[in-house]
Image (spheres, helix red, strand yellow):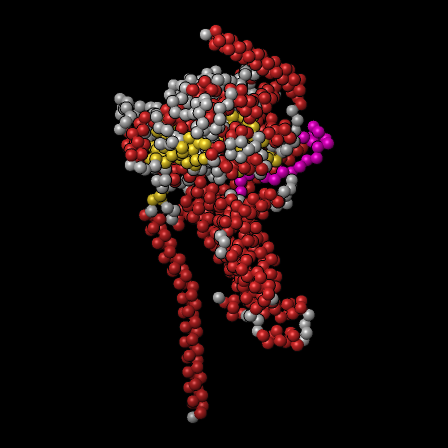
């Protein structure tokens, strides 16, 4: 007991110390920036190429281009769609792309050397939520029986994977594999799909990179594999997979094409979860500091525009995104999720005003705790083979997530009176950790400062000391 | 009597002449009419089939939908050009503002950052295929002549050619991509990497038919001509220029036509796979978009790809007619 409280108080002191030093640096920083506010220089590199994958959450990049926010910063940006996440990451690493719309897990995985090793950082988090899990019509018919109904006959939401479990077990008894698609081994979608399945008692399988097994299917009941987002509907239609987890518009596309039914959105799995980030190499940020701050400024303004007037600009944004050079899907399909509604089963359209969040709730601020959540999931499913102390999680997060750059950009926007300080977190008191988050589908609370404690709470998944 | 006979013959000849001209006219009409009939039949079958096939992206596009798309694509091109003008205007203004603040600044004009329209993509593809093809010709024709002239060289190199000839372009592509990004490093490259990738892939695939055809053509020159050259004691280079080249031009051209056809097919596939700018990328992007317009836009691209392939072949044929002494070989 005494021991416990002692370590507790020790931690407390440490945390206070940590917070104090943070405040100090933040304070001195603000003093500096207000003195040098005038001096944000011209960009060192003006012609930039940014990559993206055809998903609605690339919107801040498209808006910053179309609304002239990049040009306001003196940046001449070419925007290029990429074939898949691997090609995109390689493009940023080998310099073909200066920056890109990335999965939150990509800069983290690259930094710890899971997959291609490279120092990728992120000064800007692009959005919250925006994904969904879709199953084929055939699976949906079987699932529907297990889901309780509302008074009006529609299924009660959120739908948990418990409803899917009997079907997966039937597949297992018959010796047939139950295949599902996700977009990348370190994607939000992979972790969300795994989270949802595991919360319903379905084992999504472990990775064992130290044995060369990166398929992620060890002990799996549901076999997950990679499919690029735009090909998801076609792969589902072909019967190669029975369900998938992907960003928009590819869930709504399945409803429109009548080939599948979205069962759950990631908003319901984890309310306001961080999604995509804007990734650049560390080398780029050091070689071109002004360019880095300026592109962050443009993206912040674009994100703010997307959420302004209570989503009032969204119809215009949808119009831009439906252009073939950006997402290119039909206006109606993109509008379905971007304008605050989400269509589950055909005709079952429900209001989800926060399905796509680009700016409110400090969505663009790169929180360390968000990075740590991804690291915990990498450990949970064996992508990180060995135990790591809490301090390791923090070190990685501090290396990859760069609120300092974000703060410089935001501060200069405030100083130039382009944006209001109230739009941003209170930088003097911000330590980069969100307060413990409670809104998970399984009710487990996440506290970013204690990653190892968090891992202990899961029934399915690796815990301290375990190794595949 | 003899006059009568002569008249009769004349009459007969006249009659046969008019008959002949009628027959010729009929044949010409047939020549013009049959392709049109074929085309109409095809369009009819297409629209019937299109009406009966429903994909998950809506109905399969019929001729009408594709024609509408051609118009759309052109309109997009026009509006993109307007945007480009506005882009340069804004840039000039921005440059001027900066000079006003900072007189030492040397203004730069940056290229338009907007999207490539369908017409731009066509031009990119054409440029790439022609550059790749010309590079291949520069390598293949001298090599082919050398192999054709020297039996020893032929025996040495033939196995390599035979092994590489059937390799699909798409197998080359990853290797080419990695090699180019490793070796072609420069801060301000004159050609973009994607262009070099496509170009080398095209070259690798269309070198072989040219080498083989040229060498066969050179090896099978009429022995009498070779003898003449030997009697005249022509120097080696003059022998090649005066005897070998003219004699093997039909064979060389046959190889070049085959190669150009292959080059065009290879290029579209390579652009699709490597996401290099061009018509192949256009098709792939539209497929990825999965909008209700996508299929008709892809169909429009397919028709353009076919037409360009056809025109390239005709152009090659015309070139052969001008250059070759053996007019018969150019008729096929």
Return the residue nearer the eye: A218 or A250: A218
Return the residue nearer the eye: A263 or A304: A263
User: In the picture shown, does residue A29 fall above or below B172?
Assistant: above
Residue drawn at (52%, 66%) of the image: B330
User: In the picture shown, does residue B45 fall above or below A377?
Assistant: below
Residue drawn at (46%, 54%) of the image: B306
Return the residue nearer the eye: A205 or A274: A205
Q: Is residue B189 visible?
A: yes
Say whether residue B140 is left or right of residue B296: right
Return the residue nearer the eye: A356 or B184: B184
- The spot of residue A230 in percent (x, y) is 43, 38
- Queried whether the magenta region covers residue A302, the answer comes back as no
Residue A98 occupies quadrant: top right
Q: Is residue A258 visible?
A: no
Question: Can you name the residue that lies furthest to the top here?
Answer: A2
Say whether residue A369 is left or right of residue B232: left
Q: Which residues are magenta?
A: B98-123
């Amino acid at each position: 007991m005494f021991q416990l409280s002692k370590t507790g108080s020790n931690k407390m002191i440490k945390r206070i110390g940590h917070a104090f030093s943070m405040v100090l640096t933040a304070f001195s920083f603000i003093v500096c920036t207000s003195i040098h506010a005038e001096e944000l220089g011209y960009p060192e590199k003006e012609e930039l190429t940014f990559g993206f994958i055809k998903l609605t959450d690339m919107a801040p990049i498209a808006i910053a281009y179309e609304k002239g926010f990049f040009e306001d910063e003196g940046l001449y940006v070419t925007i290029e769609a990429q074939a898949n996440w691997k090609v995109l990451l390689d493009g940023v690493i080998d310099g073909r792309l200066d920056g890109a719309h990335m999965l939150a897990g990509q800069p983290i995985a690259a930094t710890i050397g899971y997959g291609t090793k490279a120092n990728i950082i992120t000064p800007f988090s692009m959005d919250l939520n925006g994904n969904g899990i879709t199953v084929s019509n055939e699976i949906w018919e079987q699932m529907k029986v297990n889901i309780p109904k509302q008074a009006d006959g529609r299924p009660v939401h959120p739908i948990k994977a418990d409803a899917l479990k009997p079907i997966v077990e039937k597949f297992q008894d018959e010796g047939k594999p139950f295949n599902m698609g996700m977009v990348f081994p370190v994607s939000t979608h992979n972790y969300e799909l795994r989270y949802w399945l595991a919360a319903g008692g379905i084992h999504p399988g472990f990775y064992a990179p130290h044995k060369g097994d990166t398929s992620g299917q060890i002990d799996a009941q549901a076999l997950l594999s990679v499919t690029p987002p735009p090909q998801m509907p076609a792969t589902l239609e072909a019967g190669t997979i029975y369900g998938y987890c992907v960003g928009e518009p590819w869930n709504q596309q399945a409803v429109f094409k009548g080939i599948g039914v979205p069962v759950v959105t990631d908003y319901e799995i984890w309310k306001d979860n961080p999604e995509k980030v804007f990734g650049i190499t560390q080398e780029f940020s050091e070689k071109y500091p002004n360019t880095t701050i300026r592109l962050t400024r443009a993206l912040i303004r674009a994100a703010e525009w997307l959420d302004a007037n209570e989503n009032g600009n969204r119809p215009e944004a949808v119009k831009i995104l439906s252009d073939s050079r950006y997402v290119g899907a039909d206006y109606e399909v993109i509008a379905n999720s971007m304008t605050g509604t989400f269509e589950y089963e055909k005709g079952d359209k429900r209001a989800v005003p926060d399905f796509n969040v680009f700016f409110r709730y400090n969505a663009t601020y790169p929180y360390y705790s968000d990075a740590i959540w991804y690291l915990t999931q990498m450990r949970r499913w064996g992508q990180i083979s060995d135990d790591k102390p809490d301090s390791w999680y923090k070190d990685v997060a501090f290396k990859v997530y760069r609120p300092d750059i974000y703060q410089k950009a935001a501060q200069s926007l405030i100083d130039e009176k382009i944006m209001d300080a109230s739009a941003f977190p209170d930088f003097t008191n911000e330590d980069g950790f969100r307060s413990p988050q409670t809104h998970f589908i399984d009710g487990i609370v996440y506290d970013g400062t204690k990653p190892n404690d968090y891992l202990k709470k899961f029934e399915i998944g690796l815990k301290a000391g375990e190794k595949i | 009597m003899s006059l009568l006979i002569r008249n009769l013959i004349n009459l007969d000849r006249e009659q046969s002449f008019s008959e002949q001209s009628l027959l010729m006219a009929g044949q010409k009409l047939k020549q013009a009419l049959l392709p049109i009939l074929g085309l109409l039949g095809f369009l009819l079958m297409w629209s019937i089939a299109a009406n009966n096939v429903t994909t998950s992206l809506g109905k399969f596009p019929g001729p009408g939908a594709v024609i509408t798309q051609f118009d759309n694509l052109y309109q997009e091109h026009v509006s993109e050009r307007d945007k480009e003008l506005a882009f340069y205007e804004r840039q000039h203004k921005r440059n001027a503002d900066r000079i006003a603040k900072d007189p030492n600044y040397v203004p730069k004009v940056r290229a338009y950052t907007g999207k490539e329209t369908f017409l731009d993509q066509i031009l990119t593809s054409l440029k790439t295929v022609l550059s790749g093809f010309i590079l291949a010709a520069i390598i293949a024709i001298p090599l082919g002549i050398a192999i054709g002239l020297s039996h020893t060289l032929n025996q040495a190199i033939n196995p390599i050619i035979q092994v590489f000839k059937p390799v699909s372009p798409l197998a080359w592509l990853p290797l080419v991509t990695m090699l180019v990004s490793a070796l072609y490093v420069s801060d301000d490259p004159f050609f973009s990497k994607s262009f070099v990738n496509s170009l080398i892939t095209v070259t690798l695939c269309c070198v072989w038919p040219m080498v083989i055809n040229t060498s066969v053509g050179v090896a099978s020159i009429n022995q009498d001509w070779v003898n003449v050259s030997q009697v005249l004691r022509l120097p080696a280079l003059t022998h090649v220029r005066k005897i070998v080249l003219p004699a093997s031009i039909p064979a060389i051209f046959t190889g070049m036509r085959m190669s150009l056809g292959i080059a065009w097919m290879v290029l579209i596939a390579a652009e699709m796979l490597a996401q290099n700018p061009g018509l192949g990328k256009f098709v792939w992007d539209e497929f990825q978009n999965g909008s209700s317009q996508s299929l008709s836009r892809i169909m429009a691209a397919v028709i353009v790809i076919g037409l360009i392939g056809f025109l390239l072949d005709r152009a090659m044929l015309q070139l052969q007619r001008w250059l070759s002494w053996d007019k018969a070989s150019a008729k096929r």
